[in-house]
Image (tube, rainbow, N blue to C red):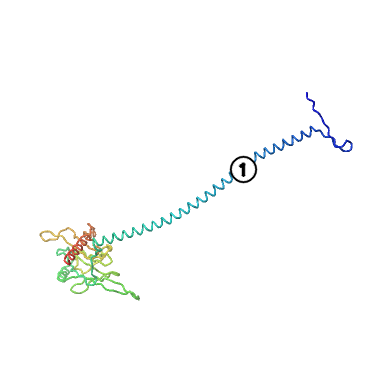
Amino acid sequence: KRIRPVLMNVNNDNVSGGAIPTNVSDDGVEKETSSSMTGKKRRKKGKEAPQDSLRNALDAASQAASLAEGVSAQAVNRAGDRDGVAGSQNAAAAGNARSLTQAAAMESHSTTTGPALRIPYNTNKVFSVDLTSKSNATLPSTVSMSSLAALENLSDNKIVADCTNSTTSPTGGTSSWPCATLTIGRNGVRQWRDILLRTKCTAMAADDKTLVVGTADGCMYLYQTSPTLGWMSGKAFRAFPPFVLGSPVVEISIHTASNNLGEEDVKPSDMVVVTSDGNFYVYILSPMGPKLNYKGGVVQAMQHMYLSSRLTSTSLSQ
């Protein structure tokens, strides 16, 4: 076995004088232990240093990523704003182009088919129609001989329906309204009257049972008379609410069918109504009221007539 030498180092020769003996080997051991501890600490510090640097690198990377995301978001927003402005400008340009195209199409259509034509109507004249009754009108059995004689005398008189346009002012008011006054007279003597306010008469027609008045506001009024005496009574009443056609009435025509013997057929009368916008309506005047049979328009025929007259005038001028 090795014998560990022990060396005593005394600073002073007198130990009792306060000198502390120290073991040389212990000093070496202490030095070794202290050096080993510092080495361990250095190793720990060496191990912690890479961890700290890695953490710092990760933090820096996350900050850089967040900054990059912010920059990209701002770029996207700016691009979206630019796209929105460009899209609105493109939409405005497209709308302007569409409007110009439509205007050009309308202009070309107007040049090829002519302007929108409307049938004129007149409100400055007095509309008049003769009212006639059936010769074989059925009279009630309670009518006396004197009444029959009076009716025969009345049948010799002429019964006429007139419609005049004028203006009227309401009581206590300052404004004036247009109105149409419909009257039924016998030999110039008025027997009955009706007033249509806020409109003017534009057409009128009648048969042995029905009187029809067309107005400038696109309405049609139907009147009927006594089922027994007919128009010889000199009276009328509004049989139905006004028929609204939407455009001023230009012409009304009533046709009563008859057989070859000249006697009136049981078939109801037909009525044709033409409005200023070129539409026409065909009604059947049944006892239960007018029934629309069919409708159509004459605008295309009017356009063809306009174009043909225009071409004729152009060829003559050349």
Amino acid tagged 1 = Ser
Location of residue 157 in the rendering, given as x and y in whole percent from the top left corner: 16, 71
Residue at horizontal 28%, vertical 69%?
A: 199
Location of residue 165 in the rendering, given as x and y in whole percent from the top left corner: 25, 72
Q: Residue furthest top?
A: 1
Whether residue 171 sits left or right of residue 260 in the image: it is right
**For this rendering, which residue is in front, 96 or 208?**
96
Residue underneath mark 1: 53
Q: Residue 53: tell me if it is visible.
A: yes
Whether residue 239 sits left or right of residue 36 in the image: it is left
Residue at horizontal 61%, vertical 43%?
A: 53
Q: Residue furthest left?
A: 261
Location of residue 292 in the rendering, given as x and y in whole percent from the top left corner: 23, 58
Q: Quadrant of the N terminus?
A: top right
**For this rendering, which residue is in front, 107 or 264?**
107
Q: Quadrant of the C terminus?
A: bottom left
Location of residue 163 in the rendering, given as x and y in whole percent from the top left corner: 23, 71
Whether residue 55 sits left or right of residue 141 in the image: it is right
* Quarter of image, res 210: bottom left
* Quarter of image, res 212: bottom left
**For this rendering, which residue is in front, 15 or 290?**
15
> Circle 1: is it few (<14), some (14-19), or many (20+) Cα within 10 Å?
few
Disc 1 on helix, strand or loop? helix
